[in-house]
Amino acid sequence: MLKERQLHDKIFTPFISEKEIYLSITNLTQELQKDYEGKEILFIAILNGSFMFASDLMKFYDKDAVISFIKVSSYSGIHTTGRVDELIGLNTSVQGKHIVILEDIVDTGITIDKVITLLKSNYPESVEVCTLLFKPESFKGKNKPKYIGFKIPNKFVVGYGLDYNELGRNLKELYQLKEE
Ligand code: IMP
């Protein structure tokens, strides 16, 4: 039986189990393998939050694919700052490639909009987004993710790579902020 977790000053309750996450990743990889039949994907994982999702998704993905990791930052505590810095760490050419961006969570959509704009200036063949979590109520972006693990309510979540002020990334499951 999973228990509540305290991270810094906040309490989080169990939300999505490890098993449910793996099932969802299996479905996502099957969909990707079907859609990209005969093509090589360049996965671009957005750090830090997507490290666990990217690692597990790559283990389940059974076709040729390459991966690169980039970093952007738009969150401080439990609120987005709405600002995204330049891409850090993209050390491969994207020209002519089929890119699938891997995100842990798409919230307002600001991060992926900015990343997609920056990537498109380097002429990839195609760009799609695969996210484990999507918050439809807070989304106001231009690029809706094509591949979505779970649609979730507009509440702050941690675990499975996602943090609250850097704590909680190591949890195997997802937890949701407890209402006070
Ligand atoms: P967006 O730009 O608003 O879509 O936010 C994307 C980024 O904000 C994600 O990559 C996360 O790092 C962070 N984020 C958004 N919602 C949450 C949450 O509920 N928990 C932890 N991080 C979040």
Image: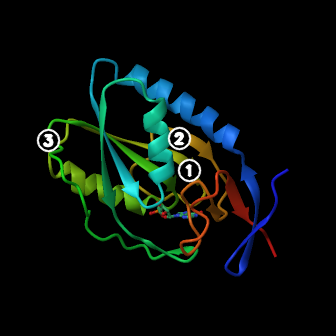
Residue 77, horizontal then vertical, whole percent: 55, 77
Characterize the local packing of mark 2: few (<14), some (14-19) or many (20 or more) Cα atoms within 10 angstroms: many
What residue type is disc 2 on?
A: Ile
- Which mark is on residue 148? 2
As shown in the figure, which amino acid type bears the numbered disc 3?
Gln
| Image quadrant occupied by the C terminus | bottom right
Depth order, front residue of 15/154: 15
Disc 1 versus disc 2: distance between alpha carbons? 7 Å
Q: Compared to 65, does 151 lie above or below?
A: below
Question: Where is residue 3 shown, x and y percent of the image?
Answer: 82, 59
Task: Find residue 97 and report its horizontal and vertical position in percent.
Answer: 20, 36
The residue wearing badge 1 is: 134
Q: Secondary structure at mark 3?
A: loop
Q: Residue at x 43, y 29 (%)?
A: 61
Q: Note whether 67 is above or below 111 in the view shown.
A: above
Kind of element beneath mark 1: strand
Foreground pick, 105 / 52: 52
As displayed, is residue 136 above or below residue 169? above
Indicate which disc, 1 or 2, sits on the residue closer to the N terminus. 1
Mark closer to the chain start, 3 or 2: 3
Q: Amino acid at mark 1?
A: Phe
> Residue placed at 65% from the left, 61% from the top?
154
| Residue pointed to by mark 3 | 95
